Image (spheres, grey):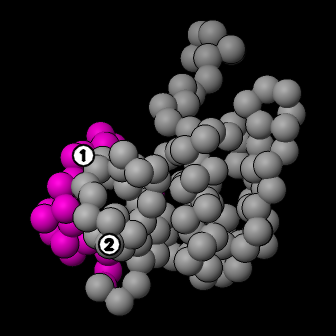
Amino acid sequence: NKNPHLKMVRMSVLADALKTMTNAERRGKRQVLLRPSSKVLIKFLQVMLKHGYIGEFEYVDDRRNGKIIVNLIGRLNKCGVISPRFDVPTYELDRWVTDLLPSRQFGFLVMTTSDGIMDHEEARKKGTGGKILGYFY
């Protein structure tokens, strides 16, 4: 490595954060620091919070990109990002759920729709499709 200043390029803030959370959860951490932050990441965390997969989280403004401190509650098995963000029409929701989640009983896909970022069940209720961001269970 000739240049000491080369660092890994961060491809996706969301992918990075979700991976960091999965790793921290596996090691039994109670809290995890995610940086940088993004609007999409915050919305994603709100969905996870709503379903009780994570505890409270707090946004820390460091006058750069911001950080988020998430309290883990030991409920999360895995969360990940789907890239590219495939189009998922309503009638294809079930196929994606079957492919990505371990069972119908639990776990959620997170999608971005014209009505905002939500889980697949809410999208189904609203009858809206969208692009898939990721999943957690």
Pointer 2 local density, CA inside 10 Å: few below 14, some 14–19, many at least 20: few
Location of residue 48 with respect to 35 vertically, above or below: below
Kindly identify which residue carries mark 2: 125
Q: What amino acid is found at the position of numbered circle 2 in the picture? A: Lys
Q: Which mark is residue 86?
A: 1
Q: Depth check: 64 or 93 in front?
A: 93
Location of residue 124 with respect to 20 vertically, above or below: below
Residue 50: percent from the left, percent from the top?
60, 73
Magenta stretch bounds: 80-103
Q: Residue furthest bottom?
A: 105
Name the residue: 61% across, 17% down. Answer: 6
Residue 87: percent from the left, percent from the top?
22, 46
Q: What amino acid is found at the position of numbered circle 1 in the picture? A: Phe
Does the rendering let one see residue 49? yes
Q: Residue furthest top?
A: 3
Residue 54: percent from the left, percent from the top?
66, 72
